[in-house]
Image (cartoon, grey):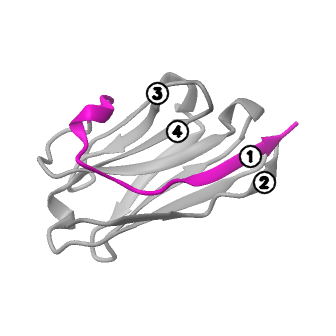
Amino acid sequence: QVQLAESGGRLVQAGGSLRLSCSVSGRTFSNYAMGWFRQTPGKDREFVAGISSKGWRTSYVDSAKGRFTISRDNARNTVYLQMNSLLPDDTAIYYCAADLAGGLPSPNPTEYQYWGQGTQVTVSS
């Protein structure tokens, strides 16, 4: 069983920064592709960023490019999302997800088998 736990979400002013962390249980974390998604009420879960198992490939939703950076520390079984220049539109619950098949990170949430509980990010204007 793989368990994921996000942390780092909080209230922040527009233009500010946050770093989200996702701690993952499991002995083969370095084989998982990882993704960050976000969701607001009434909307589908949206892909934000993804990273391949060894961290060599990353991908981002257009609105995150140049502002967000995904990274991972396979020695600590942790994936991060550094978010800069935050906007009120970034307000959402942020989830991390694990794709045990590895490979390139997918923007499709159905490709991920395990999810965390989410962490709330609120950006005030």
**How far apart are the alpha carbons under marks 4 and 3?**
11 Å
Which one is in front, 118 or 71? Answer: 118
Give the vertical position of 100 relative to 110 (above or below): below
Numbered disc in front, either 3 or 2: 2
Residue 11 tag number: 2
Numbered disc in front, either 3 or 1: 1
Amino acid at the residue labelled 2: Leu
Location of mark 3 (residue) = 61
Magenta segment: does it hold 122? yes
For the residues labelled 1 and 4, say whether their Cβ atoms are less than 8 Å apart: no
The residue depicted at 26 percent of the width and 33 percent of the height is 110
Give the vertical position of 32 relative to 122 (above or below): below
Amino acid at the residue labelled 4: Arg
Magenta region, residue range: 106-125
How many numbered discs? Answer: 4
Location of mark 1 (residue) = 122
Image quarter of residue 119? bottom right
N-terminal label among 3 and 1: 3
113 relative to 107 in the view: left or right: left
Magenta segment: does it hold 76? no
N-terminal label among 3 and 2: 2
The residue depicted at 14 percent of the width and 48 percent of the height is 102
Amino acid at the residue labelled 1: Thr
For the residues labelled 2 and 1, say whether their Cβ atoms are less than 8 Å apart: yes
**How far apart are the alpha carbons under marks 3 and 1?**
19 Å
Residue 21, position as x, y percentages in the image: 50, 63
N-terminal label among 4 and 3: 4
Residue 41, position as x, y percentages in the image: 62, 31
15 relative to 84 in the view: left or right: right
Residue 88, position as x, y percentages in the image: 77, 34
Location of mark 4 (residue) = 38
